[in-house]
Image: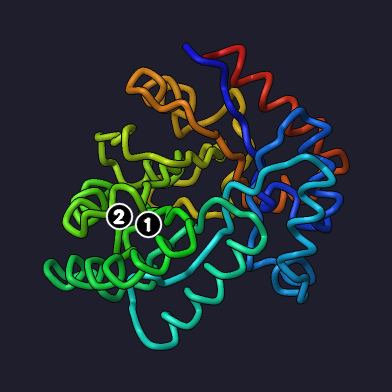
Amino acid sequence: MPPLDFALNHMTAPALNLDAFFALAVSLGITKVEIRNDLDGNAILDGTTPAEVKALAARHGVTIISINALQRFNEWTPARAAEAKELIDYAAAAGARALVLVPKNDGTGQADGERQANLAEALAALKPMLTAAGIIGLVEPLGFEICSLRSKREAAEAIEAVDGEQTFRLVHDTFHHHLAGEPDLFAALTGLVHISGVEDADVTVPAMRDGHRVLVGPQDRLGNISQIKALATAGYAGPLSFEPFSPSVHDVIDPRAAVAQSVAFIRENI
């Protein structure tokens, strides 16, 4: 099995500014990072220019593997197109490799036929924009029951339908994979894996939410270890990016020690 390739999403330690976040990653021996556009008081929302982000990444020796994310990407409107262009331009200028594409998650657009048409429209519109910028679009199905794109198979079929295999990849999120209950992995089309665990013994799977997502450890209920093993066996050798949303992780005094402990646990069990 190839060595595990860990990455760090800024959601792991959202209180850190970008400089401190990059330093945290490097201190863990991690050189691949994901930055976000949904953290108040931080890049990108604080007005930090992409040139500043690119210079900061170069100074720390890290690669920005994605900007996370274009929300509601499969609800294609003139406003969404403008937002997509802005984010794609920012990603390219910042030296980011990809843009995560997150579907609408509010109970709308779920009807059979409607959701596939919406997805096809969005991918067809995004493809030339991403191609021109040299940016990969990372499609991330969400496992929540109210999500308009839960199935990786549906996403894979839509990517194939727009001849988009050179432009788009799937995100395999271990949390959302567990919630969706879809067995297929699509390792060859996967460009990024998000990892997080759920340890709350009382919450039912349908009731699991982002706030339950902690670092992967021995009490994990999502089967992260088996998912990572299965992906590797199927040929995936890309980044495993930590993406915990729980305040219990965000509030830890020493995030480096917490992530290092999770890295060690995963390595020992793979």
Kind of residue at badge 2: Arg
Q: Would residue 146 be seen by someone viewing this image from the given angle?
A: yes
Kind of residue at badge 1: Phe
| Cα separation between marks 2 and 1 | 7 Å
Please name the residue shown 24% across and 72% down the image: 121
Looking at the image, residue 137 lies above or below residue 166 = below
Q: Would residue 104 be seen by someone viewing this image from the given angle?
A: no
In the displayed orientation, state which residue is furthest to the front.
132
Q: Name the foreground residue: 97 vs 262.
A: 97
Pinpoint residue 120: horizontal percent, then vertical percent: 22, 67
Pinpoint residue 19: horizontal percent, then vertical percent: 85, 53
Element at badge 2? loop
- In the rendering, which numbered label is found on residue 144? 1
Left/right placement of residue 270 relative to residue 142 reads right
Circle 1 residues within 10 Å: few <14, some 14–19, many ≥20: many
What residue is shown with label 2? 150
Looking at the image, residue 238 lies above or below residue 2 = below
Please name the residue shown 32% across and 33% down the image: 188
Picture quadrant where residue 223 is located? top left
Looking at the image, residue 141 lies above or below residue 269 = below
Left/right placement of residue 39 relative to residue 125 reads right
Please name the residue shown 58% across and 39% down the image: 241
Pinpoint residue 130: horizontal percent, then vertical percent: 42, 63
Which circle's residue, 2 or 1, is located before the other in the chain? 1
Left/right placement of residue 89 relative to residue 260 reads left
Query: Dots 2 and 1: beta carbons under 8 Å?
Result: yes
Element at badge 1? loop
Instruction: Please say which color scheme the image uses.
Output: rainbow
